[in-house]
Image: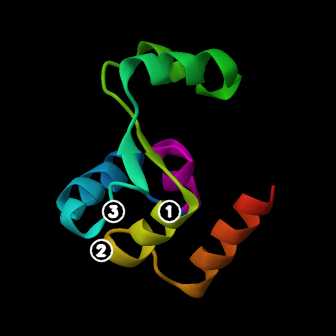
């Protein structure tokens, strides 16, 4: 999942999510949360039409594994940790 997907899922702005991820970086495993390289970003934008607006973004994007998304929910104070949030995450992963 990408930061834009996760911010929609947790109903916070992408900017707010990124702030919280950066502040909580010592609590988040680098195996589950990472930053796409410029080459990876270009490849992803090419294959996912809905990410076309990222093509012109100067910043590199955070990417999250399923465990990373759960870690963000439990370790970042700006995101919702309610049970509904966990249900939305599970539903998104099934789709």
The percent coordinates of residue 18 (x first, y second) are 31, 49
Q: Residues within 10 Å of mark 1 (few under 14, many from 20)?
A: many
Q: Residues within 10 Å of mark 3 (few under 14, many from 20)?
A: few
The percent coordinates of residue 25 (x first, y second) are 23, 59
**What residue is disc 1 on?**
69
Depth check, mark 1 against mark 2: the one in front is 1
Q: Is residue 78 left or right of residue 48?
A: left
**What residue is disc 3 on?**
29
User: In 3D space, how far apart are the residues under numbered discs 1 and 2 (Cα atoms)?
Assistant: 14 Å
**What residue is disc 2 on?**
77
Based on the picture, tell me whether residue 7 belongs to the magenta stretch. Answer: yes
Classify 3 as above or below 72: above
Classify 87 as above or below 14: below
User: In 3D space, how far apart are the residues under numbered discs 3 and 2 (Cα atoms)?
Assistant: 16 Å
The magenta region covers 1-9
Task: Pick whichever of labels 3 and 1 is earlier in the sequence.
Answer: 3
Q: Quadrant of the C terminus?
A: bottom right
Q: Are marks 3 and 2 in contact (CB under 8 Å)?
A: no
Say which of 75 and 26 sits in front.
26
Q: Residues within 10 Å of mark 2 (few under 14, many from 20)?
A: some
Based on the picture, tell me whether residue 54 belongs to the magenta stretch. Answer: no
Q: Residue at x 60, y 77 (%)?
A: 86
Depth check, mark 3 against mark 2: the one in front is 3
The percent coordinates of residue 35 (x first, y second) are 35, 38
User: In 3D space, how far apart are the residues under numbered discs 3 and 1 (Cα atoms)?
Assistant: 11 Å
Q: Is residue 72 left or right of residue 95?
A: left
Depth check, mark 3 against mark 1: the one in front is 3
Q: Residue at x 53, y 55 (%)?
A: 65
Q: Which mark is residue 47?
A: none
Task: Pick whichever of labels 3 and 2 is earlier in the sequence.
Answer: 3
Q: What secondary structure is the magenta-colored segment mainly? A: helix
Q: Residue at x 59, y 26 (%)?
A: 51
């Amino acid at each position: 999942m990408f930061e834009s997907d996760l911010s929609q899922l947790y109903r916070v702005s992408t900017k707010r999510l990124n702030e919280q991820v950066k502040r909580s970086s010592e609590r988040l495993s680098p195996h589950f949360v990472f930053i796409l390289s410029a080459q990876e970003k270009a490849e992803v934008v090419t294959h996912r039409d809905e990410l076309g607006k990222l093509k012109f973004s100067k910043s590199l994007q955070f990417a999250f594994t399923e465990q990373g998304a759960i870690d963000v929910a439990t370790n970042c104070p700006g995101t919702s940790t309610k049970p509904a949030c966990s249900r939305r995450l599970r539903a998104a992963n099934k789709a």
